[in-house]
Amino acid sequence: MGGTVILLIILAVVVLYGVSAYNGLINLKNQTLNAFKQIDVQLKRRHDLIPNLVNAVKGAMDFERQTLEAVIQARNQAVAAGANAAPGAVKQIAAAENQLTAALSRFNVVVEQYPQLKATANVGQLQEELTSTENRISFSRQAYNDTATQYNTKQQQFPTSLFAGIAKATPAELWEITDEGERAVPQVDLSMKPKA
Amino acid sequence: MTDDTSLNLFQQQEANRRRTVILVIGFVLFFAWLGFGGDFIYYLATADAAPETYHHTFPWFGLLMTAIGAGIARYGFATGPNKVLWSTGAQEVVDPATDKERQLVNVVEEMAIAAGIPRPRIWIVPDPDPNAFATGLDQGHSHIAVTQGLLDLCSRDELQAVIAHELGHVKNLDVRLMTTLAALVGAVALMHDGMGRLMQGGFRVGGGSGGGGSRGGKKGGLGQLAIVLLVLWVITWILAPIISQFLAMAVSRKREYLADAMGAQFTRNPMALASALQKIESADAPTSSIKRGAAHLCIADPLGRRMNLHEGGMANLLATHPPMAARIARLKGMAYQRLKAEGQFPTT
């Protein structure tokens, strides 16, 4: 009698724990998906902004045609990569976007060389928009990576790991980026550094 | 590490929800004490009176005061954010007009993304002293306000750091507790001012030979217990605003360190917040448009009290904010840790 009661209690505790672990995993999975969508939104914003920016400076920067074309080309490639990639194919999108980031930073360096261009109200505003968009992208990436890391850790940690299969939890890919220093130099280096 | 902080975040949110409930209950109980205590004293005072005179047997004051207390708490909780914003004269940025305003809107959007919460509504307080605060009841309905001085003085990075600090308060629901507290402290102060005047009048009547008005009790029957109660009751009335001030202080000091850390986590740039705090500190004119009632909500004490320069002793009791030097030192420590880590491998 007493033994059955104890057994039942233990069983109830295990079931309750399992339910909460399962729900926790599902919760994190959705958060991770949501965070990934957020990056998409910001990348779309960036893709929409670039044509405006290029148009605004095209007249004044005729002699910098090469830089402009590089930006446009990188942008089109990134849009294509975003459209063609399977959902969750983080690596592919990241590579195209990193290229665009590099092209944009070179473009920014060029614009900095033309103070009279920057002084135009329109260009100044567009530059602020560009800065903000770049920040939004990196912050949404940061939020995604934080959430995904949390999700991955939860999946691997015992005893939650026992329920990862039931919750159909698979490790989420992190969004690797080249670091700030590399981004600033106007030279494209797409080799992704291995994580220490 | 991320796992730890998220757990702490959840605990923080729960603790803030719980403390808000306790605060509201305490507030209503306080009103009940004021009311029922008054009833009891009045009852003792009239118990021995002649049979044909008025006997106070039904606790009208108690019920009335409890109802008033509950009403104020309900009203204060619901309208707290608006009241706080109104009291500082903040104006909402709906359509950003200047470059700085556009930048502010952009920065808030960026940090909302980093913090993973909906974008709060943005307000500007027309005051030349740099300061900022956040208010609201939950993550979905929050407000962030900065002074014009902060906009003028800070670089983009510094502004970002300050906004990140405020969003830290929003994310861990500090705003819920602190806004409710601000609303209730305000209500107590107001009530104290108003009722103090009323009571003075009342006592003069009571102190005279029992004539004026229906409420002038006969003095003859006041027992010892009644006198003790009366003294205690009056003391509560006098101390009410002081007690509520203490509450406001105790509640806010540790939170600033925590919000600093959360802000640094959102921006990954602790030095920007350190330099923003430095700028806020060196502009030492008090923020005149932010009054005592909302002081504990701000990133830096708007009253510029000297008490905030120290830690320990009296300061632990009286200051609403930790010393600026200590906050800056902690942020610099974080930046150092980060640099050390960055030397070896790239981070996000």
Image (tube, rainbow, N blue to C red):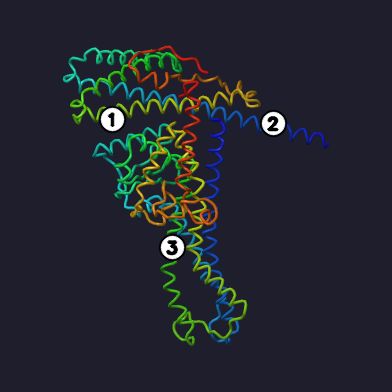
Q: Name the residue nearer the viewer: B290 or B335.
A: B335
Mark 1 or mark 2: which comes first in sequence?
2
| Label 3 crowd bin: few (<14), some (14–19), many (20+), radius 10 Å | some
Give the residue pinned by disc 3: B189
Residue A110 locus on image (x, y percent): 25, 20
- Pick out the residue farthest to the left: A59
Helix, strand or loop at mark 3: helix
Q: Name the residue nearer the viewer: B315 or B134.
A: B315
Residue B195 locus on image (x, y percent): 44, 70
Q: Chain of mark 3?
A: B
Helix, strand or loop at mark 2: helix
Q: Are dots 3 and 2 in contact, CB under 8 Å? A: no
| Label 1 crowd bin: few (<14), some (14–19), many (20+), radius 10 Å | some
Q: Are dots 1 and 2 in contact, CB under 8 Å? A: no
Give the residue pinned by disc 2: A14
| Label 2 crowd bin: few (<14), some (14–19), many (20+), radius 10 Å | few
Inspect the image, locate mark 1, and give the three-letter code of the amino acid beneath it: Glu
Give the residue pinned by disc 1: A128
Q: Are dots 1 and 3 in contact, CB under 8 Å? A: no
Helix, strand or loop at mark 1: helix
Q: Name the residue nearer the viewer: B83 or B164.
A: B164
Seen at 19% across and 30% down, the residue is: A119
